[in-house]
Image: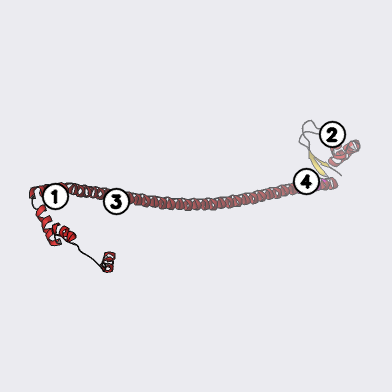
Amino acid sequence: MAKKRKDKREFEEPAEYDMSSDTQDEFNNEPPMLSRSDSRRGKKKTIFKYPLLNLLIVFFLLIPIVIVIVFVTVQNMGSNEVKTETESTVNVSDNTQAKEEKAKAKKAAAEKAAAEKAAKEKKAAEEKAATEKQEQDAAAAKKAEEAKKEQEAAEQKAAEEKAAEEKAAAEEAQKKADEEAQKKAAGGSHTVQAGETLYGIARSAYGGAGAAAGVEKIKQANGLGSNDVPVGTVLTIPQ
């Protein structure tokens, strides 16, 4: 537009312009030029000349527009519903997942607590068993020590008793030996038993070598005139 105006300003008529008669006649024969307002009025009259046709044109123009608007609206509604359903599904899925994770965490915590409790109980049971075993071992060791001491005491007592018996027997034997020696030294007596002879008694008192002399000693000590001695006679056995 600015270019056109510039061109218009720059347009200059030629200095010498000779309008001949022929040219004027041609110019006068041309139809008169209409102004812009007259042109617009003519167009308006043409448009409103057929109102029914104009209505049909407007109707047919509006139909596709309405169809497009309805289609877009339905699409938007459907997308909104799908979006809502998707969001609902996502929310439900998120809630379900959160619940599952919470349940898993709770289950893991419960399992951990149960494992810790079982470990503590196992440790306590092992400590108790170890303590009981130590007590049992100590009791068994004490019992074995007491049994050993009792056995040693019994053996010592038996040894002492045996030694006492042996000592008593030795003392008794020594006493008898002393008595025999005293009898031999001081003489003694003998009661005649059935089947004994004076020679046998003399041999027992004086030995085989001194039996004959012993018979004479016994006879002299007891005032016997012969070798016959009645059973039950108490004879004095001289040294």
- Kindly report the distance in space between the C-alpha atoms of the residues bearing marks 3 and 1: 42 Å
Identify the image quadrant of residue 193. Answer: top right
Give x and y (percent) for residue 10. Answer: 28, 68
Where does label 2 land, which residue?
200
Label 3 crowd bin: few (<14), some (14–19), many (20+), radius 10 Å: few
Identify the image quadrant of residue 24. Answer: bottom left
- Identified by mark 1, the residue type is Val
Say which element carries label 2. helix
Among numbered discs 1 and 4, the one appearing first in the sequence: 1
Where does label 1 land, which residue?
58
- Of badges 1 and 4, the one in the foreground is 1
Where does label 4 land, which residue?
173
Among numbered discs 2 and 1, the one appearing first in the sequence: 1
- Residue situated in front as seen by the camera: 126 or 187: 126
- Kindly report the distance in space between the C-alpha atoms of the residues bearing marks 4 and 3: 124 Å
Label 4 crowd bin: few (<14), some (14–19), many (20+), radius 10 Å: few
Where does label 3 land, which residue?
87
- Of badges 4 and 3, the one in the foreground is 3
Label 1 crowd bin: few (<14), some (14–19), many (20+), radius 10 Å: few
Among numbered discs 3 and 1, the one appearing first in the sequence: 1
Residue located 84% across and 48% down the image: 186
Q: Which residues are magenta?
A: 171-180
